[in-house]
Every structure is written in structure tokens, then in C-alpha cells.
Amino acid sequence: MTGTIVFWVIVAILVIAILYAVGIYNALVGLRNQVKNAWSQIDVQLKRRHDLIPNLVETARGYMKHERETFENVTRARSDATGARGVPQIAQAESRLTEAISRFMAVVENYPELKANQNFLALQEELSSTENRIAFARQAYNDAVLFLNNKIEMFPSSIIANMFTFRKEAFFEMEDVSQRAVPKVSFS
Amino acid sequence: MFWKVIASNRRRTVLLVLVMGMVLAVLGFLLGEAVGVWTQYASLSAMPGGDGAAAGHRAGFTGLCVAGVFWIVLLLVSLLGSDQLFLSLAGAREVTHGMYPQLHNVVEEMQIASSLPVMPRIYIVDDPAPNAFAVGKSTRNSAVCVTAGLLAMCDRDELQGVIAHEIGHITNRDVLYLTVAATMLGAVTIIADTLLRSLRYAPAARYRSSGPRAGKGTVNLWILLAAAVFVVVSPVLSRILYFSISRRREFLADATSARLTRFPDGLASALEKMMLSPERLTTAPKAAAPFYIANPYKQDLHGGMFATHPPLRTRIGILRAMHTGAAFKDYMKAFWEVTRTRKPLIPTSDMQLGRTVEKRGPRPDENHAADAPGSSARKAGDIMRAMNDYLFITCACGMKMKVPPEFARGKVRCPRCSREHKVGDPDQEVLAAILTATAPLSGGGQPSAEARAAARVPGDAQVEPRKPGTWQTLTCRGCGRGVQVSPVFHLSRVTCSGCGNVITLEEEADGSPVPPGRENPH
């Protein structure tokens, strides 16, 4: 009699444990998918920026005849960024591209006719919006990564995470250009 | 994201629907009884001795059934179409990316930051008071709405703060609760009004039936009294229920906004503008007041028990006091500091302890050039006109005319140079309207080459060179008549008096445009 009671208690505990484990597993999968989604959003926005830059450069070229170096810097940074693979490399290439664009924008300040061009203004709004989107997508990605990594490290879920080899993801850290010193602008 | 808040909002929505069902059932029963009493007395006065009491009970049951059906209809309406209902009640119109790229971009940025799965639809209300609200049923089906006044007053950072606040309402599922609550509340108010009206007629019937059934009459009087109490109490009860939740909700949305934008000062500055604005929102339906970011009825200065919003002063103070960062815990620290309490505003499990979120600085100044003061107000006005089917005609003299859709005549005269423009060809005009509304203002309002070309009359228009300072005789190509042009005539177009043909006068290459009415023949 007591044997059957003990048996059923053990079964009940096992069932509860399994249900709990399934819940944790599903939560982990959900978090991993969120990280993936957030990453794809960053990817979309980075592509959008890569697509905008040639338009911007083409619009500006007619006005800025003597700024070959600036144009080349932007174009080179862009092609580096499109070719980059892996989170750290992409982060590095993209922050270089951001820097090149901000230098380009600083040079644009010297060309009032270009700044008055409506086409250029529309492109500038799109580009600055894209910069913001990248920043916000990065923010959302890092939040998702933090949630996932916390779940993987913390105690009961860490067992499940180890069993099914959930890997911790890397944060997407870009050097913040605005926090640095003002970029050097040549007035030659 | 506030998981606890989301869960509690879901729970509250279900609870509210159930409570409203019960309130409706009681109201319906009482309404039925009241109708029954009324018909009873009516039939009594018509034919004494009729079985009015039984009819009265059946009426109560019928009322219950009607209330049940009504409840189901309400539920369906509030879950299926209430967001659309409130948007149309508020007079909101949807805007596309082409109409206002900046607003669209700001919303999309915040959608990305909050990782909402679907972009909310964007609406504008034509109202000079700065305000905004969000509606929706889920994170996949939502909408944000801003007033034209907000667009006119706010720069990009402020707009971003406001939009992030509204997105915060969507991610916290406040919108679901509010939408259901407002629909239900509106319905209860309508029913209470109906009941009140039926009560007003019932005593008139009662006076006719004094006599043998006086004892029965007092019982019915009690029912009527209970109904009257219910009529008075039910809206107040639902209002208390409604408002008790509202206030924390706004704080949490503010905290979300600060965290998403990393810039609490943007929202604070927008709220300051709302507080100082003398305009009152005229388009807000009363039941929808809790939707808005700032109370449209301005009763929140003292923040009493029935206030739908916490005082704006407190909210601004908290946002401005966030010195340490933009995370939830910084908001809570500032909240404690400003309200001098230790109330746990945000559940600790939702706080992501140990995570520091740095604030960012304001947007660099050079980007403000595109939306300099004044121009954003004008832009907002133009967008509203474009949405209201105004025609935009750019005259060759640089004058921009905005023709209201009621304007029925086929031609409009430019007030600056009295040139006539055709008001036809709607497709072309609307396209031009969108172009002029969306294009950032540049320079001193000089029309572009395209605008000049568009303003020219189509077909083989007659163009003549203009010699300034002399009399000129032109031959009209339409009827062969001679057209005299005086040296003081300063317009670039002349109409033939014989056939109405318009002759365009082109300035000579070296002749600078003569200022109107200034020149004298030397």
C-alpha cells in the first residue's frame, strides 16, 4: 500500500519536473528566436544603409568636385562592411562606415547648395533614420542577448541549457562615434 | 518589457469583461422591469384587472436576454473593431510614408527598438492641441495617432519620446485593456441614459393608477428606486474602476519611453509643451480621454481621485530627474525622489537588475536645420491640407496656393501676381500637393524648375520676350489682335481681351525682374 503511494508520488514529481523542464526549454528556444529576429533586423537595417550610401554619394558628387578622398573613404568603408562576416568583424566594419559617413556629413557642411538640395535632404533624413534604426536594433538585440545569456547562466535553466547545448551569444558592441573626439575635417 | 504588467493587463481585461457582463445583466433586468412596470400601468389604465404583474416579470427576463445579446455584441465590437471606432471618433486619418517621412521613420525606429513584431499604423488628427494616443488589440494590430499640433510643435527628439511612450502602451498591453474598457464604459453610459429616460416616463403612468393596486405599486416603486440608484452608481463605479488603473500605466509608459529612446529629456520636453499649450483638444471623445498621453480635459492639474492621468508636473519632474541613466531602475529612483515615496512602481522581476542603460545626448544641431522653427508648423499644416484633399498650386511667381476642395470654380487667381491657374486635372494636382507637402522647405520659397514648368499652361502657349521699361505691342496668336503691354506692367503673363489667350512674357536674360509697381519710365 505504502509502496504504491511512494510510486505515485515519485511519478508525480517526475511529471512535474519534466513539465518544468519543457517550460524552461521552450522559454530558451523563444529567447534564442528573439535573438535571431533581432539580429535579422540589424541585418536588414545595415543593408538598407549600404543601399542608401551610393545614392547619397551620387547626389553629392555633382556638388563636391574636390572631395575625392572623402568619397573614396565612404565607398571603401561601405565595400568593407558589405563583405564582413561574423558579429565582431561586422561590428568593426560598420563602426568604421559610421565614422566615414559622419566625416562625409561634416564635409557636406561646406556646401550650402548641396544642403539645400531636396533630393539630398530626403536622402539625409532616410540615412539618419537608418542610423537610428541600427542603433535601436542593436539595443533590442543586446537586450535579447542579455535575456538569453542570463537564462543560460542562472541555476535551474542552466541545466537544461547545458543538456541541449544552448550557446551564449555575443553582444553587438559598436564604438560610439559621437562619444569620441570631433573628427578631423580638412579644409584644404 | 513589463511581464507582470502585461499579465495583469490581460487578467484585468478578462475580469473587466466579466464584471461588465454582470453589470449589464443587472441593468438589463432592471430596465426590463421598468419597462414591464410601465406597460403594466399602461395596460391597467387601459383595461383594469389585466395580468400586468406576470408581463412585468417576463419583461425582466427579456431585459436580461437583451442585455446578454448586447454584451456579446459589445464584446465582438470591442475585440474586432473598437480601435477603428475610436480612431474615427477622434477624427483620425491614416498617413503614409510619402506624406510625412519623418513621422513614419520615427515610428519605425521605435518599433525596432521595442521589437514589436508589426509596425503600428500611423494616424494624424487635425487638431492644434498637442497630444497623442495609441489604440489596438494586440502587438500585431495597433495604431498610434498624433495631432497636427504635436507635429507642429515638436522636434524629432520630442516626437520620438512621445511615440516611444505610445509604443510602451502597446507593448504593455494597456491598449487592449483601455479599448475594451472604453467600449464597455461607453455602452454602460448609453444604457444608463436609456434607463433614466424610461424612468422619466414611468411616474407619469403611475399617477393614473392610484387605487386598488397601490400595494403592488410600492413594490414596483422599490424596483424603480433601485434602478435609479443603479443609474447613478454604475457609471461612477465603472469610472472608479477605469481610473484607478490609469495612473500607474502612464508612469510605466514614460519609463518605457525613456528606456527605448535612451533620452528621457525628449519626452519631458514634449510633455512640457503639452502642459504649456493653451489649446484644448476638441476632437477627443470623452470615453477615450484615458487614451491620450496628456489628459485632453486638463483636469489633471490637481490630480484628484477621478483624474485619468497623473499630474504632468510629476511626470516631467521624474523624467528630468533621471540623472543616472535611462534604465527602469533609474526611472524608479527618480520616481521615489520626486514623489517622496518608496512605492514599488515597477516589479523587481521586470527591472533587469544589474543592467545599466546609458543616456544619450540630444540630437546634434545640424540636423535641426531641416525642421527649423516655423517650418515644422507650416509642414504640419500642409500635411493636413494634403490629407483634406486641398489642391496645391505653385505659381510661377513663387506663391504657393492651397485650394480647399469646396472651391468649385475652374480657375484660381494668384493673389500676388494675379495669374490665373486651372483647377483641373486632380491627379496631377494631388501629386504636386504631396510633393510640396513632403519636400523640406529650402531657400526663400523660390519655385523649382519643375514647378515653373508645371505652372505653365499646357499646349502651344505663346511666349514673347519682354523688354522692360518700354511699351510693347504683341500680336495674339489666337485671334490676331494687337495686345498692348504698358511699361509699368510687371506681371509675366497677359491675357488677350479678344479671345482670352494667355501670352507669357519671358524676361530678357539680362533684365532683372522689376519689383512690382516701383519702376518709373525714365
Image (cartoon, rainbow, N blue to C red):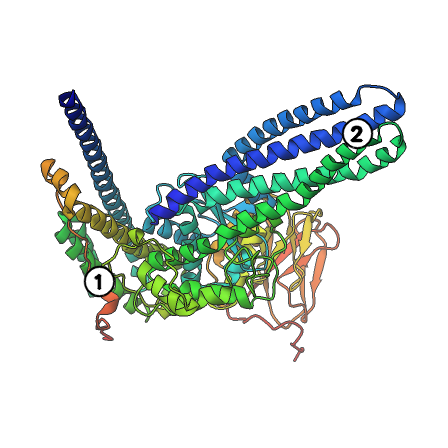
Q: Secondary structure at mark 1?
A: helix
In the figure, is residue B76 to the left or right of B401? left
Residue displayed at 36% across by 60% down: B258
Q: Nearer the viewer, residue B50 or B502?
A: B50
Q: Is residue B247 above or below residue B122?
A: below
| Label drawn at residue B27 | none
Q: Residue B429, how many percent across, how many down?
A: 57, 47
Q: Nearer the viewer, residue B209 or A70?
A: B209
Q: Nearer the viewer, residue B248 or A132?
A: B248
Residue displayed at 14% across by 48% down: A153
Q: CA distance from mark 1 to mark 2?
A: 90 Å
Residue type at mark 1: give it: Ala
Q: Secondary structure at mark 2?
A: helix
The residue identified by callout 1 is: A100
Position of the C terminus of chain B, as image quadrant, is bottom right
- Which quadrant of the figure has residue A109? bottom left
Can see residue B5? Answer: yes
Residue displayed at 47% across by 45% down: B175
Q: Residue A6, how many percent across, how many down?
A: 15, 26
Residue type at mark 2: give it: Lys
Q: Does label 2 lie on the same chain as label 1?
A: no
Q: How many marks?
A: 2
Q: Residue B65, how many percent across, how many down?
A: 62, 25
Give the foreground label among 1 and 2: 2
- Which quadrant of the figure has residue B188? top right
Q: Is residue A47 above or below residue B32?
A: below
In the figure, is residue B44 to the left or right of B99? right
The residue identified by callout 2 is: B216
